[in-house]
Amino acid sequence: MDTDQLINKYLPYLMEVRNRILWIVSASLVGGILGFFLYDRIIGLAISFLNIEGVNTAFPFILAQLVSFLRPALKPPEFRLLVSLLPLAIILFVGGFIFGAVMMRYVIVIFQQSSARLGIGNILDVGSLLSAILSTSALMGIAFQFPLILTTLIYFKVVKYATVAKQRPFAYLAVFIFAMMLPPTDILTDFILAVPLVFLFELTLLLNKIIKGR
């Protein structure tokens, strides 16, 4: 296959990727401009609500862009399966985001209580604090998508159920490494963050085993 044929074959896909990226970048620029002019109000809302609504609003938009990009490459049954999983994906993201935010709130409360008990001032930086909250919450929301990704891979026979089940110790190790990389640095918080991910992994294996046995 010569260069012209390669270009003609892959150029439409590259153009589609470019269009999706432009949409996402445009949305980010609009958010950045609004943040520049409404900084005080946004900080107040973020502190009050941990910015849950903003991130949750962006996540469905990203999913819609991803589905639109994948649609031409999927067969009708595969596309219907993907669309049917979208509500669950949003629910899992919201659940993971809220769980991460609650855990960060727990860490902040413990830190403030310890500071008061030791008689030291509050040294928390608002910018760093919000960054840590949003990072942990968003990453937990993304991590909660793992059951859907794993189920899809098993359904399309990209990976085998038996192979995934045998790799359970490595999956546990990966979960705990992921939890330790998140902003909370104490072992107890890392363990609590890892527990729901392990539960979701085991639940995914159980559901796929039941489906496979039918």
Image (spheres, rainbow, N blue to C red):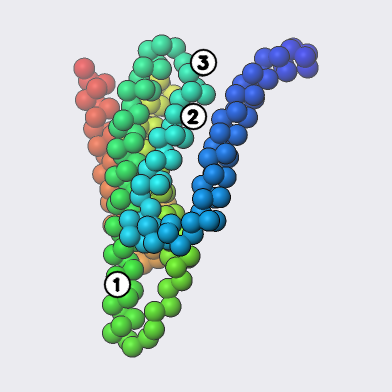
The residue depicted at 28 percent of the width and 84 percent of the height is: 117
Query: As rendered, which of 159 and 122 lies closer to the eye?
Result: 122
Q: Residue at x 27, y 27 (%)?
A: 208
Location of the N terminus by quadrant is top right
Left or right of 7 in this view: 63: left
CA separation, marks 2 and 1? 40 Å
x, y percentage for residue 107? 32, 66
Query: For residue 9, what is the image quadrant?
Result: top right
Q: Residue at x 26, y 44 (%)?
A: 199
Quadrant of residue 2 in the image? top right
Q: Disc 1 marks which residue?
A: 110
Residue 34: horizontal and vertical position, in percent? Answer: 51, 50
Which quarter of the picture shows residue 26?
A: top right
What is the crowding at mark 1: few (fewer than 14 residues within 10 Å), some, or many (at least 20)?
few
Where residue 152 appears, as percent x and y from the top left, is 38, 26
Furthest-right residue in this view: 3
Q: Earlier in the sequence, mark 2 or mark 1?
A: 2
Q: Are marks 2 and 1 in contact (CB under 8 Å)?
A: no
Label 3 vs label 2: CA separation?
A: 13 Å
Amino acid found under the numbered disc labelled 3: Pro
Mark 3 vs 2: CB contact within 8 A: no
Mark 1 vs mark 3, CA separation in Å: 50 Å
Q: Which mark is residue 3?
A: none
The residue wearing badge 3 is 72
Secondary structure, mark 3, is helix
Residue 203 in view in this figure: yes
Within 10 Å of disc 3 (Cα), the crowding (few <14, some 14-19, many 20+) is few
Under circle 2, the secondary element is helix
* Residue type of the residue flagged with mark 1: Ile
Which label number is shown at residue 65?
A: 2
Whether residue 206 sits left or right of residue 25 in the image: it is: left
Of labels 3 and 2, the one closer to you: 2
